[in-house]
Amino acid sequence: MSRILLYITTLIAMFSAARAFSTPCRAMANRGFSAKLKPASFVARSMSTTEGDETSIVDTCKEKIVKALETDDVKVTGAYDDPNGSHISIEVVSPMFEGKRAVQRQKLVYKAIWEELQGPVHAVDAMICKTPEEK
């Protein structure tokens, strides 16, 4: 009887140990921690150049917002002194915001930089969207 109890206890311990090691691995794989190669477009976006000068992701975001919202009053800065621009703050003044609520204005900005949000930009930490009258 004691041998059976010892055998069952050993099986339970082995099962628990195996499960403890496999669950975090599965969870990490589900969150994208597996050894995946980045697509070529990601590398090209984060290392794009213009006439030999490197264009930062902050400059790229600013250019796309200027073009999409038809305004020159755009300020994009890297937050927390981040040279890579993975966290950015955005200030935009555009007549396209007339009659729109704050969330609708933010959607227009996010739409302009959607491609960068899929790769090099991790987060927009602050966003101020105003009309020329609100400035």
Image (cartoon, rainbow, N blue to C red):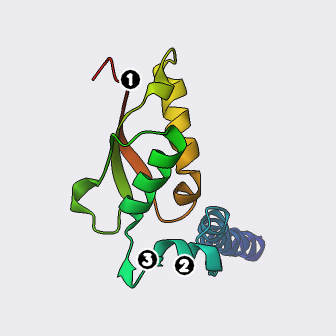
Tell whether 63 sits left or right of 87. right
Residue marked by disc 2: 43
Q: Earlier in the sequence, mark 2 or mark 1?
A: 2
Q: Please state the horizontal and vertical placement of residue 104, each as a whole percent of the image.
A: 54, 25
Q: CA distance from mark 3 to mark 2?
A: 15 Å
Residue marked by disc 1: 131
Q: Which mark is residue 72?
A: none
Between 81 and 96, the residue placed more toward the observer is 96
Q: Earlier in the sequence, mark 1 or mark 3?
A: 3
Q: Quadrant of residue 11?
A: bottom right
Q: What residue lies at 67% left-to-right and 74% top-to-bottom? A: 18
- SS under mark 3: strand
Q: Earlier in the sequence, mark 3 or mark 2?
A: 2
Q: CA distance from mark 2 to mark 1?
A: 35 Å
Mark 1 packing: few (<14 Cα in 10 Å), some, or many (20+)? some
Q: What residue lies at 63% left-to-right and 80% top-to-bottom? A: 40
Q: Which mark is residue 50?
A: 3
- SS under mark 1: loop
Q: Is residue 95 above or below residue 68?
A: above
Q: Quadrant of residue 59?
A: bottom left
**Dots 2, 1 in contact, CB < 8 A:** no
Between 44 and 123, the residue placed more toward the observer is 44
Three-letter amino acid code at the position of disc 1: Thr
